Amino acid sequence: MRNKNRLARRKGTAKVGGGFVDGSRKSLPVRRSFPHNDPTGETAKGATVKIDIQIDGPTATIHLTGEITAQDRAAFEEVAAKALASGPQQVVVDLSRLDFMDSAGLGFLLILLKMGEEKGAAVALAQPRGDVKDQLELARFNLLFDIRDSA
């Protein structure tokens, strides 16, 4: 079996994660896409995450739903700026409905942390689950953020 996989890799036809090394997309899984909805009701073209803000006194909560990827940068930064504009003491990012986050998503959280520090607001992450939780643990975000089991 091992020899067959090595031979297939040399020929460029080995299966990798549901697709083929040769770039064929016949068996690649299709990713679902969610529109970005910010408080103004505008939709960012190509966005894959739904972002909602809830401001309750000294706490601003950013709810992420779906998948957050590199193409969501402008939408995330805009919503983060709006959340911090209200002058909260803390910003909580609710990850309970986030299904996927790539490395850019980790970078967005770091940007929010920096923005929060500049405005004097603590930033916490709430209810990560599944692969998102695993990524946060691997990246050791627990050393940078307060990660909570509840929002």
Image: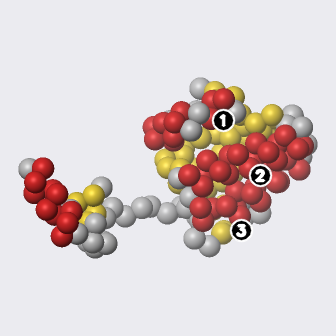
Query: Gap between marks 3 and 2, in whole Å?
Result: 15 Å
State the residue at coordinates (10%, 57%). Answer: 4
Residue 80 marker: 2
Note whether residue 151 is visible: no
Residue at image mark 1: 125
Looking at the rendered image, the quarter that the C terminus falls into is top right
State the residue at coordinates (66%, 68%). Answer: 43
Looking at the image, tell me whether mark 3 or mark 1 is earlier in sequence order.
Answer: 3
Looking at the image, tell me whether mark 3 or mark 2 is earlier in sequence order.
Answer: 3
Please state the total of marks drawn on the protein image.
Answer: 3
Q: Nearer the viewer, residue 113 or 149?
A: 113
Q: Is residue 126 above or below residue 1?
A: above
Residue at image mark 3: 42
Query: Gap between marks 1 and 2, in whole Å?
Result: 14 Å
Q: Residue 62 appears in which quarter of the rendering? A: top right
Tell me the amino acid under the disc marked 3.
Glu
Note whether residue 32 is visible: yes
Tell me the amino acid under the disc marked 1.
Leu
* Residue 129 drawn at (x, y percent): 50, 36
Q: Quick check: 49 left or right of 123?
A: left
Q: Label 2's element? A: helix
Q: Residue 30 appears in which quarter of the rendering? A: bottom left
Residue 147 marker: none
Q: Label 1's element? A: strand
Q: Quick check: 5 left or right of 132?
A: left
